Image (spheres, rainbow, N blue to C red):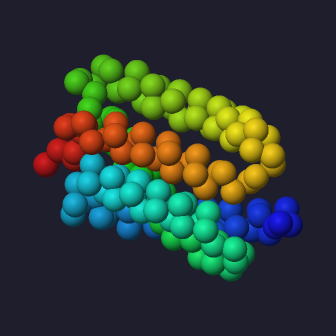
Amino acid sequence: GVAESMASLLLGFFSLTFILFSIPGGMLAERWGRRRTILTGLVALTLLLILASFVPSVYAIAAIMFLGGAAWALININSLPMVVDIAPDDRLLGTYTGLYYISGTLAAIVGPILNGWIIDATGKNYNTIFWVAPAFMIVAMGCMWFVTRGEAKT
């Protein structure tokens, strides 16, 4: 029930706070560690998206997207440095970076298609996005739980 222009604006709130929290997200990782910072972002974004499925107000969704952008910064800003620091030696940095970008690009391609199929399968219920995305965040948390390397070298 949201106009397309308003839906785009909601995503704009997400993008704006992502930009605003990019540097603080990196600074927080210096203090907490990358793994803990990424896990915090994943938990926060999961909870915010689930909360969004229960909120009927566009203004409340805007606030949730605003906070979600900050959570996404905690995840995204620290992921590539973690992958780079996992590389066993400098010769493999390009390979590890390439694997990072392949997986991110595949997610950007497959994610909207998968969401579209799920929305169609649920009778055009766009609210399902707020349940599908957290499910994948939980999968990401499961993967991150077993990561033992990739913190900044001192």
Q: Which residue is situated farthest in the left direction here? A: 154
Residue 105 % position (x, y):
59, 33
In terms of depth relative to the viewer, which is nearer, 153 or 149? 149
Relative vertical location of residue 73 with respect to residue 99 in this rendering, above or below? below
Residue 73 in sight here:
no
Relative vertical location of residue 91 with respect to residue 140 in this rendering, above or below? above
In terms of depth relative to the viewer, which is nearer, 13 or 23? 13
Residue found at x 81% / y 46%: 123
- Left or right of 35? Residue 55 is right
In terms of depth relative to the viewer, which is nearer, 82 or 37? 37
- Left or right of 61? Residue 82 is left
Relative vertical location of residue 136 with respect to residue 55 in this rendering, above or below? above
Residue 133 % position (x, y):
56, 48
- Left or right of 53? Residue 147 is left
Residue 15 % position (x, y):
61, 62
Which quadrant is home to the N terminus? bottom right
Residue 96 in sight here:
yes
Residue found at x 58% / y 51%: 131
The image quadrant of residue 42 is: bottom left
Residue found at x 51% / y 30%: 103
Residue 48 % position (x, y):
51, 65
Label tally: 0
The image quadrant of residue 79 is: top left
Residue found at x 22% / y 24%: 88
